[in-house]
Amino acid sequence: MFTSRVLESLVESLCCLPGVGQKSAQRMAFHLLQRNRKGGLKLAEVLKQAMTKIGNCKECRTLTEKEVCHICLNIKRQENGQLCVVESFSDITAIEATGQFSGRYFVLMGHLSPLDGIGPNDIGLDLFESHLYKGNITEVILATNPTVEGEATAYYIAELCYAHKVLASRIAHGVPIGGELELVDGMTLSHSLLGRKKM
Amino acid sequence: MFTSRVLESLVESLCCLPGVGQKSAQRMAFHLLQRNRKGGLKLAEVLKQAMTKIGNCKECRTLTEKEVCHICLNIKRQENGQLCVVESFSDITAIEATGQFSGRYFVLMGHLSPLDGIGPNDIGLDLFESHLYKGNITEVILATNPTVEGEATAYYIAELCYAHKVLASRIAHGVPIGGELELVDGMTLSHSLLGRKKM
């Protein structure tokens, strides 16, 4: 279909990106070739570097090209004593963007799912427990997703924390800011009623 | 914001793809790093190859890694005598997919636009005229886009063809197949009335 074999394999390879099908891949390939070859070359270079150099932080399992990430190395964050447990890397980016948290993180890279054969050690809870043993954590903030699996994982980790006499807390569920009350689903609304605060 | 400098520049570089903003770039980077490093490495390799090796066919200006593309080299297509003029590379892919055309192509890589300083030579019409001189073209099919600029470009090229005593034709405009008549815009509908055929 294409006038060039290399172009054909470029379109095919671009399809490995999430949300990119044949048509978008074609558009991307033509755009890079016609208008931005320099950008395309830079992307190829950075992509290769990222795929080979980025590994996981051995403290918190987040993505980093060093052995331990800069968040875990930060002494102020170590002294803070709070540890925020999240399901994926992008959750760290989202929480960091709020500027409301100054402790360290722990990335599960998934959630407990016995039916899929994903147990505690598959989401790094052995490493997490070793952090609890060290004794420099005062609070574990459970920021897993508000799904059935996310809740179950949070409960499991909370039990672990209490076994080590460490406080465990769960992020608040309720009505999102800026939304309209009538558009919020019933489950969220009942959570927001149950979790009401004195003004 | 990110836990890794390389990750940050990967997200930045992915933004050079059309239709990809900060959020999608982030999703793509995390997806590749977490689930498909092999695919990411292959993409980097193919991208580099494409950006450095793919050039333009010196006959029809389409994208190819050879000097002359396989369509121009095809003797059956040369003997056919038809030359289809299109605005962009992707138009060739679309026309080839129909299987209705067995001549050669000529890619303008744009259209005439005097206000933007784009004249005949910027869209390769000097090369196009040299094809007309050779005398082995029996018909030029003008498949530029049905926009004001596309129509103007088609008229200009048709004049060129008649100066060289070569037949020039324009692809039909009308109601698209499978659509509903009441949803078709007025301009298209009047074209379809003017271009009606005896049944």
Image (cartoon, coloured by chain):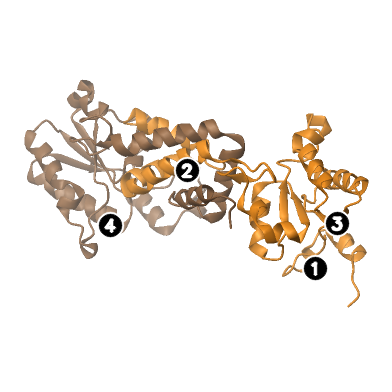
Chain colours: A orange, B brown
Q: Nearer the viewer, residue A103 or A149?
A: A103
Above or below A178: residue A90 = above
Measuring 71% from the left and 66% from the top, which residue is drawn there? A100
Measure the C-alpha gap from mark 2 to mark 4.
25 Å
Image quarter where the C terminus of chain A lies is bottom right
Q: Are marks 1 and 3 in contact (CB under 8 Å)?
A: no
Q: On the rendered structure, is B85 left or right of A70?
A: left
Mark whose residue sits in front, 1 or 3: 3
Looking at numbered disc 1 in the image, what kind of residue is underneath it? Answer: Leu
Disc 2 target residue:
A24
Q: Earlier in the sequence, mark 3 or mark 2?
A: 2
Does label 2 lie on the same chain as label 1?
Answer: yes
Q: What chain is tagged by disc 4?
A: B
Farthest bottom residue in view: A199
Mark number displayed over residue B149: 4
Above or below B51: residue A116 = above
Disc 1 target residue:
A181
Measure the C-alpha gap from mark 1 to mark 3.
26 Å
Disc 3 target residue:
A169
Looking at numbered disc 3 in the image, what kind of residue is underneath it? Answer: Ser
Q: What chain is tagged by disc 1?
A: A
Q: Are marks 3 and 2 in contact (CB under 8 Å)?
A: no
Q: Quadrant of residue A156?
A: top right
Measuring 89% from the left and 64% from the top, which residue is drawn there? A195
Q: Quadrant of residue B106?
A: top left
Q: On the rendered structure, is A182 left or right of A14?
A: right
Mark number displayed over residue B8: none
Mark whose residue sits in front, 4 or 1: 1
Q: Position of residue B147 (x, y in %)?
A: 33, 55
Q: Secondary structure at mark 2?
A: helix
Q: Can residue A3 be seen from the camera position used here?
A: yes
Q: Secondary structure at mark 4?
A: helix
